[in-house]
Amino acid sequence: MKHTLAFLLLFLLSLSASLRSNAQAGNPPAADQPRVMNAKVETRALQGPLENGFHALVSRMQGPAWVGYSVPEVSGDRSICCGDFMNDDSSFRCGRCRLEGRTDEGVSINSNGRQRAELEGSNRVSVLFRVQDSAVERIRVVSENCELDGGGLPFIWLTGVRPAESVALLAGYVTGTNAEGREAERRMHGALAAIALHADPSADRALEGFTAPSRPEQLRKQAAFWLGEARGKAGLAALKTMAHSDPSDNVRAHVSFALSVSREAGALDEMIRMAREDSSAARRYSGWLRKRGRKPRARLPTPSKTIRTRRSRKRPCLPSANCRRTTECPS
């Protein structure tokens, strides 16, 4: 009996040591890594500048795979997921994001003023790159607490990424390609969204640079949206500059829309000024709203109506997202 117990004890100790060894060799999840299922996950510590390490990694990847990292998220009441579900206590949780397949497009920004239980303590966003044939095909950004389904592909998670280096890397996918078509446009939208959600001053500078009159009109419009949606006071200041100086009536009309999603106190005042002084932009913006059965906020003169409009306004989804609320965003 004693020999049996001793043998059993030795077996259990050996098994425990083996399990510890396997766990150490299997790259345990990093602290900032999202929940990833159905994927071959590998964690790598970044060595040196992000741009050099990232491009070197991508150049060696022929088959489809995902590469990701996380950065601090700019403050704001939002979650960025592939669907929101209500819990029993009326709080919200993110739905599972399927990175591959027919459902890989849906992303929504959701904010209704109620604190989400799962977002307490979560202040990072995951930036994800779909790579194939040594090139980045798509860029996505989701809240840290979203569960990801990798579609059975390799999933490489990078640690130690600096936010300013991440903004510089993403900016290259906004302006550094001459590719055309839907794929290039989706990549640009994903990079813009990711930049806008960085809690770093370099994101403000990058977005403001995209609004220069020399930039393409479509890029200026999308940058304006994100300045209003995510960049707070710095975003409002940039939008005011655009409202006064952008040469395109169409872009200035989009600035009015961007002001309507801003949470800053001076945004409504600037909308009212534009409605009174910029007739061309005001007509374009009002026409876009009438097509959707909505009234322009800037034409509501009384404080009571203004407050009611602020409370009832719908939040738009990502301009590039293929979800029901995409029509909330002007083209």
Image (spheres, rainbow, N blue to C red):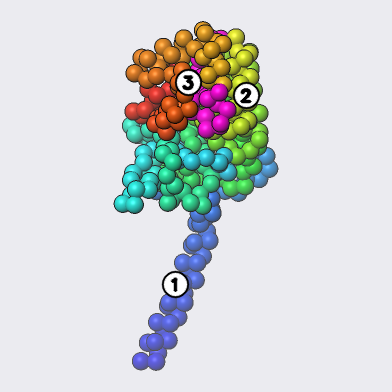
Q: Tell me if label 2 and label 3 are in contact, CB under 8 Å.
A: no
Q: Could you classify mark 3 by the number of other residues whose Cα lies within 10 Å: few (under 14), some (14-19), or many (20 or more)?
A: few
Which residue sits at x=44%, y=29%?
Answer: 304
**Which of pointers 2 and 1 indicates the residue nearer the eye?**
2
Tell which of 9 and 157 is nearer to you.
157
Region rendered in magenta = 248-269
- Splitting the image into 4 quarters, where does residue 97 fall? top left
Q: Main secondary structure of the magenta part?
A: helix
Residue 160 position within the rendered picture, expressed as x and y whole percent measured from the top left: 62, 47
The number of discs equals: 3
Side of 90 relative to 192 (left or right): left
Element carrying mark 1: helix
121 sits to left or right of 9: right
* Distance CA(mark 2)–CA(mark 1): 61 Å
In terms of depth relative to the viewer, which is nearer, 165 or 109?
A: 109
| Outermost residue to the top | 280
Marks 3 and 1, Cα distance to the nearest angstrom? 74 Å
Residue 238: mark in rendering:
2
Position of 193 relative to 38 (above/below): above
Residue highlighted by disc 1: 15
Residue type at the position of mark 2: Ala
Sequence-first tag of 2 and 3: 2
| Residue 248 quadrant | top right
Whichever of callouts 3 and 1 sits on the residue coming sooner in the sequence is 1
253 falls in the magenta region? yes
User: Which residue sits at x=58%, y=33%?
Assistant: 232
Specify the label residue 301 is tagged with: 3
Disc 1 marks which amino acid? Leu
Q: Is residue 171 visible?
A: no
Distance from disc 2 to disc 3, alpha carbons, whole Å, reads 25 Å
